Amino acid sequence: MQERCVAMHHLDIAWRPSDDEQRVGRGERQGNWAAKKHRGNKVKNYYYATKKTLDSYKYFIVDLKRKFIDQLKDGTVKVRTLDEGDMGDDGVPSMAAFIARLSGNEDLLKKAKIDKKLMNLVRLQGSLEQDHARCKSTIKRNGERIEKLEANLVQIREQRASFDKLMPANEKGERQSFIEIEGKKYTDPEIISTLVQKKVNQTLNLDTFDPINIATIGDFQLNVELFKSYDEDQLVNQYSLFVTRESDNVKVGFGSKVLKEDSAKFNSNYVINSLNRLPKIEQAHLKDIEKANDETRVMEQRLQSINLDEHKQQIEFYKEESKKLDELMEKKNQPAETPEEVERKTKVNKVWKQLDQEFVDNNLHSKSINLKSPEEALKFIADFEESEYKDKYRVELDPYSSHKVIIRENGQNQEKGMGDEPPIINDPSSTYGRSSNMRM
């Protein structure tokens, strides 16, 4: 085979491009003197497929895989999703598409493809709506957060200015600590530490979760805030200590259990140490504002890229295309009309063409017709439903006469356009009333 192969016939279809390449390579090898001498050094490959089977689908899948692999190899992939033809989102082949391919009906195959596209669009719509709502929610939330952070920045800068004025730093950066308790000012570290610890211990027996002011430092307040916590399997009051100004949202401190019983210096400088954190807190607020603004810009760009109206228009377009194909296939599946049926409909349309022209010439909106019998009246209505004018007029039995019908333009009420006794028309070619005049 390696020396005398001039043609290869592929009777079945490989599922992987590599399998097909391996097959072809078995014939296209060095040392093949027969192909070189008789076939211009080429080996022909013949592929076979059967109409109205899944062979075309198998070839399509192999070719799709080959193209995608080639794009991955040369780095030219321009899409993030791969259309797998008749495959569904769960990797299971679409039965509707298989039926269409097996039937050989191009309309049915086109319908299967449109329905798949429509299904994917409907699924994507839900994801886009969620993404759209998420972007709007994030933008709103960030707007509120930025507004709050900027208001806090104003308070932080005011607190820094008040702190520098109240406790100015010396050349070494040191500040003189003091507090005021019950109208008395204290500067001694030992006294400050003792009084603060005493005030804190007094609050631990209170039953409240509102901030409790225990001392003042100019326009600043030293507050205690209680909370419940377990200590050795018992639920007891714990506290956090923070510094703030009245009506300010910004408060600074070191969390819970902040006082040290053996360090009067630490306790007396608690206010100074807390307020010294204001510059770092200000920088953190600025970073949070910048981060929120960046996220808002990303969400706004994403929001502009989501066109829900255009997506809904695509869905409506494919719905309409699917509906048209349904109507087309239904029409094709209907049995062909016999020559007699065609002739009958031609005569019916001829009668209605005459009636329509009379409506136009005489500016009529309705009229009545006397027929020979109730059966003729019912036949007149049945034929009308198959005429070319069924969307322009409506026909109904006269409630006072079983052999009379009333014709009205669509949109006209029963009274409008009704006149005196209608004239008599003699139409020999009419399907109705051939042996007698037809009263109109």
Image (cartoon, rainbow, N blue to C red):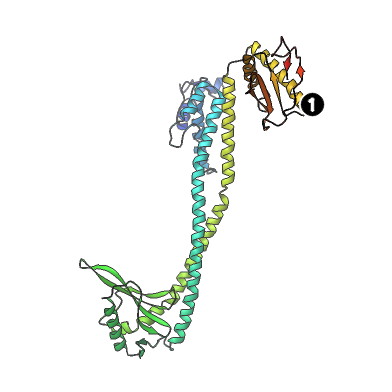
Q: Which residue is mark 1?
A: 361
- Residue at 46 percent across and 86 percent down: it is 165
Q: Which one is nearer the viewer's eye here, 125 or 94?
A: 125
Rendering quarter of residue 352: top right
Task: State the image coordinates of residue 371 (x, y, percent, origin top left).
Answer: 68, 16
- Residue at 50 percent across and 71 percent down: it is 151
In the rendered view, tell whether residue 402 sits above or below residue 124. above
One can see residue 58 in this view: no
Task: State the image coordinates of residue 395 (x, y, percent, origin top left).
Answer: 65, 24
Rendering quarter of residue 108: top right
Q: Which one is nearer the viewer's eye here, 274 or 42?
A: 274
Q: Which one is nearer the viewer's eye here, 171 or 268?
A: 268
| Count of labels in the image | 1
Q: Is residue 210 left or right of residue 42?
A: left
Image quarter of the N terminus: top left
Task: State the image coordinates of residue 43 (x, y, percent, origin top left).
Answer: 53, 24
In the rendered view, tell whether residue 263 sits above or below residue 403. below
Image quarter of the C terminus: top right
Task: State the image coordinates of residue 12 (x, y, percent, origin top left).
Answer: 46, 22
Q: Which one is nearer the viewer's eye here, 183 or 176?
A: 183
